[in-house]
Amino acid sequence: MYTQGLDQAGSKPRRRDGLETDAQLAAFQARIDADEKIEAKDWMPEAYRRTLVRQISQHAHSEIIGMQPEGNWLTRAPTLRRKAILLAKVQDEAGHGLYLYSAAETLGVSRDQMVRDLLDGKAKYSSIFNYPTLTWADIGAIGWLVDGAAIMNQIPLCRCSFGPYARAMVRVCKEESFHQRQGYEIMLTLVRGNAKQKAMAQDAINRWWWPSLMMFGPNDEDSPHSAQSMKWKIKRFSNDALRQKFIDATVPQAEFLGLKMPDDKLEFDEQTGHYRFGEINWQEFYDVLAGNGPCNRQRMATRQQAQADGAWVREAASVYAEKQAARNAA
Amino acid sequence: MTEKNWPLYEVFIRSKSGLSHRHAGSIHATDDQMALDNARDTYTRRNEGVSIWVVRSSQIVASDPAEFAAFFEPAKDKIYRHPTFYDIPEDVGNM
Amino acid sequence: MTTHSDVEQARLTYALRLGDNALVLGQRLIELVAHHPELEEELANANISLDFIGQARLFYSCAGELEGRGRTEDDFAFLRDDGEFQNLLLLELPNGHFGDTIVRQVLFDSFYVLQLEALVSCTDAGIAEIAARAIKEVRYHLRHVSQWLIRLGDGTDESHARVSQSLLDLWRYTGEMFSGDLVDDCLRDACNGPDLARIQEQWHDNVSALLKEATLDMPEDGWMISGGRQGVHTEHMGFLIAQLQHEQRACPGASW
């Protein structure tokens, strides 16, 4: 999920490596066009490799940072059943981060390096996780809207041209199928509850609707590198197409809940069969992506703290393994 | 403190008895026991397995994609290895 | 003399205590989500926490049936005051660093495994059934955290020093596991429940062997703190309960 900012953030101009001949590039494109999967040890253009490392690692970082906003409610989940479900979901996010780092590692970059890039602020993650979870309803809204948007993004990635990424996404999508449903179930329970709970549900949508639309990334005309990603079949649909699909699927679900999306311009267009919607605040999007969202600093600080606190543990395990190996060799 | 990267392991899972182990993904661990635990905790959360193999990724010997043609293509034209190569009259029945 | 209703009451209290232990430790472990030293350990800890929450739910439901007044797992978890919880004090202590968490878990799981093994043959069918299920989970937990204790004890000088201190800090909470009250006596005598004196011996032997492998010194049994069985907790408990019950208390009577 969460690969929105990728085709611009940190994207360098394509380097034509001296070793990459036109014949190689053409042969590679022919494989892609024939819907062949590219595997890690296969020849690939350096720019393809770099695009994938960046996209997959950002995706992985997003999963890992994404544990925090929901983790914020683990100790306060209102029932034991909800607590167990939420924990299983947050655990899935850790697992998905792990699968994705593994997929990126096949391209020759170590997980430790990717994690360092994140902690040093060099790598990006999805803007959505820089918003705070203020009430229990936010946990419902995240499951329903954020995971719903993520799934729209992720299902096409199961057919991505790079084999290890595609396989990781198949596993991720299969496991995530319960995430959106549990979120919607939380919302349903709230809107059927007392007045305070209903208000909580509406408030959560008010805060999460627009940020979840931003998850699909900038408008197509502002997404200059998308074309190359589509040509390489890393990306299968444009940002705007996926966003529209998400809106069309989600608005009726809100109506069923009796909740209103915070957009006065939202209306169904009989002619196109799609919903028309208002202008996204792109300034906010770029601000959050640049580090100026409500929780950016907090999320990074938490991650950095965990990494620092664990250093002596990771070292002890390595040293113990060396000692054991030496003993076994003796 | 200089940190050492934890080694990478490949994980293979037998989903039920009677089937082969299949590659599921990879994990990091400092020792073999930890690798098994981590594989169990990561890849069998939904009851996906009855047996796990882990092996250090560095220990796997793999064929080279650059030698694909020499390595695999010679097997392509040995069609007489396959049952459909042979014409047996229908009257003979299943064979 | 033990009457029928004494036995009934003891079974109920015992089930609640098992639930309280599982819930309070599960709640503490959940606080660690997104704070683990390595990604793989996030998954391991979440599995362990999920097991404990699952066990708490089962023991509370069992208690609800024994009580017969219609109270649910959530009523026990969210609508009792901290003084009504009867968990071991060890389990409510703040997590500290990774070594503290591992040592706490080793000390408790070493006990819990033996307790559950004994409970499998308890004559209370409800408790015995849950114990038979939980024992598989807890055996894995114990193995996992024991391996970690060995790595930390026999790792670097720093890790050795850290877990040695964790042991010293937490040792005084271990006596409470074995100092039973009338409820424990009643369950042992009337329901073939655990014999705490025997468990203590086995625990001592097992932990001593593990610490030896981890190159750690076993602390002397000195003064031991207790109070959990009487609902007299540490200062930390109030905060744990406040977080746990936050939503149910803020919005009384709502469904979730």
Image (cartoon, coloured by chain):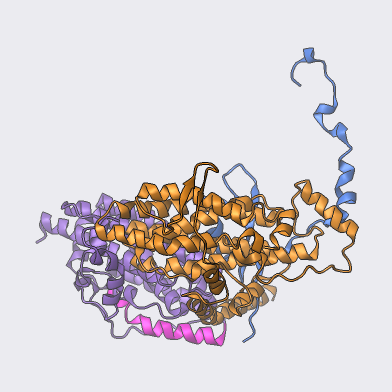
Chain colours: A orange, B blue, C purple
Residue bounds of the magenta highlight: C156-176
Q: Is residue A249 visible?
A: yes
Q: Residue A259 vs residue A122: left or right?
A: left
Q: Nearer the viewer, residue C223 or A88?
A: A88
Q: Residue at x 40, y 60 (%)?
A: A205
Q: Quadrant of residue A83?
A: bottom left
**C171 part of magenta stretch:** yes
Q: Nearer the viewer, residue B34 or C83?
A: C83
Image vertical order of residue C92 relative to residue A197, above or below: below
Image vertical order of residue C130 relative to residue B73, above or below: below
Q: Residue at x 42, y 57 (%)?
A: A264
Q: Nearer the viewer, residue C40 or C110?
A: C40
Q: Where is residue B84 shown, x and y percent of the image?
A: 81, 27
Q: Residue B50 vs residue A160: left or right?
A: left
Q: Where is residue A259 shown, x and y percent of the image?
A: 36, 53
**A188 part of magenta stretch:** no
Q: Residue A221 vs residue A198: left or right?
A: right
The total of numbered circles placed on residues is 0
Q: Is residue A324 visible?
A: no
Q: Main secondary structure of the magenta part?
A: helix
Q: Residue at x 66, y 60 (%)?
A: A221
Q: Where is residue A50 shown, x and y percent of the image?
A: 73, 67
